[in-house]
Amino acid sequence: MYIKLFYQERIMQVKELQPIINFIWTVADDILRDIYTKGKYRDIILPMTVLRRLDVILEPTKDRVLSTYNQYKDKLDNLDSLLTGKKMGSGHVFYNHSNYTLTKLLEDPDNIRANFENYLDGFSSNVQDIINKFKFRNQLDTMEDAQILFEVIEKFCSPSINLSTEPILDEDGNIIHHGLTNLGMGYVFEDLIRRFNEENNEEAGEHFTPREIINLMTHLVFLPIKERIKDGTYLIYDNACGSGGMLTEAKKFIIDHDGEIKSNATIHMYGQEISPETYAICKADMMIKEENPDNIKYGSTLSNDQLGDLTFDFMLTNPPYGKSWGKDQKAIGVRKVKGKTVCDDNRFQVGITRSNDGQMMFLLNMISKMKHDTPLGSRIASVHNGSSLFTGDAGSGESEIRKHIIENDYLEAIIQLPTHMFYNTGIPTYIWIITNRKPEQKRGKVQLINASSEKFYKKMKNSLGEKQHEMVETHINLITDIFTNFEENEDAILLDNQEFGYTKITVEKPKSSEDLENEEKFLELKEKDKILEKIKIIEEENRPFKSRADFIKYLDVKLTKTQQNILIEKDNEKIPLKDDIEEYYLKEVKPFIASSWIDYDSFKVGYEILFNKHFYKYTPPRDLSDIVKDIKELESQTENLLEEIIND
């Protein structure tokens, strides 16, 4: 039901707000077209949309803020509490103590640049942060040189649109333009971002996760515990928050009184983002929606975590995958110590991934911020590509992270999504669901859901970059039901945690006499002839050995460890954790290589999650008679074609 309302509301909101969105877009078409390339329109439109929204919100209290500012500016060093207060200030978390509003700027066109800079300088520090991250002041020279600064401001102050929360009335008190709610303003801002993303698909996936994917994630995170979050206070976190979509949609899903949960809980949203413009977009959106913008942090989550020891009830994220985090590695002191990769950051002591892909480090960051002292603990939904499932051998950083998650029984489920769901990639993607309070039915188990087939998506009429598929209400409901009901069917399976683990062992055996005779280092050994003779006897008799020591004793030659390695061939075996190593070796290896033995010092436990292993569907080859028939038909067609060519 909620999903249906979600899409109906989105359609209704966008339809009602489309005139505002279209009008703002005309600024680009009418004014910026010959000055900026399409990819640069956002550098003007986005910050000006934010400024105009903040400007009209502050207008009713402008005189009060100016009076307070002028009264105390020479008496106090910090006026923030006064200028944001309800009695003497704006009543919002931001303010502007400049004498100007955007509308007043139009009264003095000859000094528009200087006055506009004065206006920008009058904003509170949180708005200054947004302006600086947008690098908006860098655009003033271009707009002044092209003589369009006045036109841009005039356009945004047009009476044709209303970005205020209050309605605009005519002389008779009739409503000309309805007020724009914070939610409505959020939709306007989001739709503008979407349009810019479509203009520049290369950047679209950097900070914009399709809403139906977020909708699915919120269902998987919140619905299993919906009866337990009807009230209270909860913290939501996104450690790669982009433009903030996951945070705002997650909060809305919980408290929407038309939704499935209808909670009265207090929700606080936190996020961190490394891209300056995207951070500015997110912080502005929080400010527009009257959320706390200071909860959105700027900088690298991996090397500059600005939320410290704060823990969260819920975490949702779509971290970057396949991207280097080499700079972060240097910042946190990643180094090799006695062959092991270590770092100075306590969050990442479990394991450190290779430098060319840091996606699983974002997962570790969230796990480090789980609550362990509350009844609900923490629930996490994180989107990844396939490499997080299986990249890295036993003992590698990736495998150690999987091992930590599974052996602590944190992994509840992984859902494989259809391909071509995201704007900038068509590769398979997966949603990990992690919690430290697993439902009883799933304790010690992991649910794998293969939602990649056509029953879980529909093809879009028009692609958006790489996004060719989308999920609608029926698809999201289907996946949610499979997940919440712990179903096992052709698309879902419940497996014991142990099923994903294996012990990697090294099996050694003597090299063949033929290989040794062609190996330069062996031929340098003083006892090579004696050794070679012994090796040939081993081959003739298929002689078994219990260990390396047993083999060396048989050779009856004193050899260093390095010299021993010249004579020995090594191979690796992955033995499922559920299997006894000795039994496996005696059944699967020893009968075929009698002279082999196990290196008991080599054991390493690894974990991998192989979807194809569990969901592979065998397609039988075509019948041989059908293939022969097709070949004969092709031969016949070729002969006729040759005759036609000759006759012509």
Image (cartoon, rainbow, N blue to C red):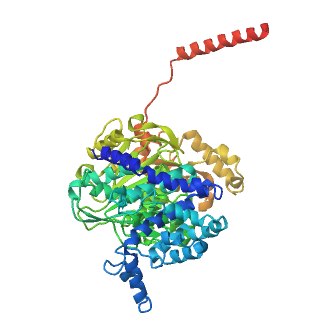
Residue in the foreground of this view, choosing between 120 and 286? 120
Q: Which residue is drawn at 30% across and 39% down?
A: 488
Say which of 508 and 595 sits in front: 508
Residue 217, placed above or below residue 166: above
Of the 4 image quadrants, the one containing the N terminus is: top left
Q: Up-down: is 67 above or below 550?
A: below
Q: Can residue 216 be seen in this view?
A: no
Q: Position of residue 457 (x, y in %)?
A: 41, 38
Whole-percent x, y for residue 405 in the image? 37, 58
Nearest the viewer among 336 and 243 is 243
**Quadrant holding the C terminus:** top right
Q: Is 60 placed left or right of 22 in the picture? A: left
The residue furthest top is 647
Measuring from the top left, give residue 589's x and y in whole percent: 47, 42
Residue at the spot 39% in from the left edge and 38% down from the top edge: 456
* Number of numbered markers: 0
In screen coordinates, is 139 left or right of 182?
A: right
Q: In which quarter of the image is residue 38?
A: bottom right
Q: Which residue is nearer to you in this view: 532 or 282?
A: 282
- Residue 230 in view (yes/no): yes
Residue 517 on image: x %, y %: 70, 47
Seen in the image, is 627 located left or right of residue 314? right
- Residue that sits furthest to the front in the current view: 172
Q: Is residue 280 above or below residue 459?
A: below
